[in-house]
Amino acid sequence: MPRAMIEQIVKEIKEDRRFLIASHQSPEGDAIGSSLALAIALKNLGKEVTTFNQDGVPKLLQFLPRAKEVSRELPRGITYDCAFIVDCGDPELLGEEFPRIKGIRKIINIDHHSTNNGFGDLQFIDPGASAAGVLIYRLLKKIPAEITQEIATNIYAAILSDTGSFHYHNTTAEGLRIAGEMIEQGVEPEKIAQQLYETQPSAYLQLLALVLGTLEVAHGGKVASVTVLQEMFQRTGTSKEAAEGFVNYPSSIEGVSVALLFREISEGKFKVSFRAREKIDVSLLAQEFGGGGHQGAAGCTIEGTLPEVKKSVLQVVGKHLQDRDP
């Protein structure tokens, strides 16, 4: 059983009036889709809802129903009966804006990351779930709340995104059943897939060409990496969201067990994304650098020059592979 207090969460929803829903910075489809699905359901129940993400909704996800209702700033002086933190293993990942809100009576933690630190007054955490969108679906069924087409679209996009269009190891029978039910609710899979995977500006491909030129293979072909520098974003007129998913390119190389993406955040600071093939838990690798995530996909932020960061990460990955396959 998941570490859940779902009955108490439902009680809070029924008794409370004003809610805040927040998700992690640099959000992807699961963070935004899950947040929006919950927000729409609560509004349909007559609740007052503020949906927040410090980085806002990436352009790629702005097609989602009610995406324009996500705020990048929180109003001062407003109190909330309850704040839902969705798809976020650590409240520090919400950004510096969230802690400035003092008037929150209760925090509810809804997540599926195995590295979640269990924060909040109530927790609904299940690392076995394909996506946070699955947990939102379970919660809405428990209330019960009607799953409208708007909600269904967001839940479907959340599951599709976090399973890598049903490619990743976290694809489960439950996730596929829920996706099928969302289609029965009117979701059009081809349209969502086109928006997520087949609608890119030409600058995206220009950036990809530069990034693929940085491809490196190490540890006997078991590790492959690419690098994205700020200078590349400037040359192509793109931003960090354009690089989301680039780690999948080195991951696709035959024989690679762990793929890495080194993205420069600022001078001397890099975000490292990990992807695993086979049954390698890259969340353990990310945790060694203060990060976290899932077994097959994780990330962390490391300070240092690019050569220093690469050396540190490759050493940890190499040791892990050696311990696994002595």
Image (cartoon, rainbow, N blue to C red):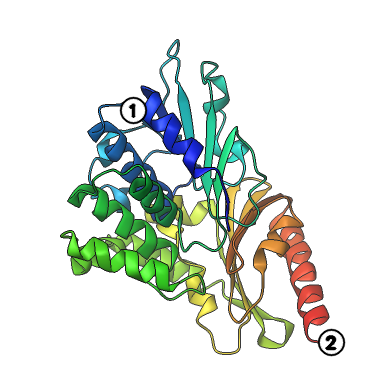
In the image, 111 versus 59, the foreground residue is: 111
Establish if 282 lies above or below 12: below
Q: Quadrant of residue 81?
A: top left
Q: Residue 271: x percent and y percent?
A: 61, 53
Residue contact at pointers 1 and 2, CB within 8 angstroms: no
Instruction: Mark 1 or mark 2: name the one nearer the start of the chain.
Output: 1
In the image, 58 versus 150, the foreground residue is: 150
Q: Residue 308: x percent and y percent?
A: 76, 59
Q: Quadrant of residue 40?
A: top left
In percent of the image, x 54 and y 55: which residue is there? 112
Q: Residue 48: x percent and y percent?
A: 31, 24
Q: Is residue 298 left or right of residue 150?
A: right
Q: Amino acid at mark 1?
A: Val
Disc sitting over residue 326 in the figure? 2
In percent of the image, x 28 and y 62: which residue is there? 200
Rounded to the nearest angstrom, the CA distance separating label 1 from label 2 is 53 Å
In percent of the image, x 78 and y 62: which residue is there? 312
Q: Amino acid at mark 2?
A: Pro
Q: Quadrant of the N terminus?
A: bottom right
Q: Label 1, secondary structure: give it.
A: strand
Residue occupied by mark 1: 49
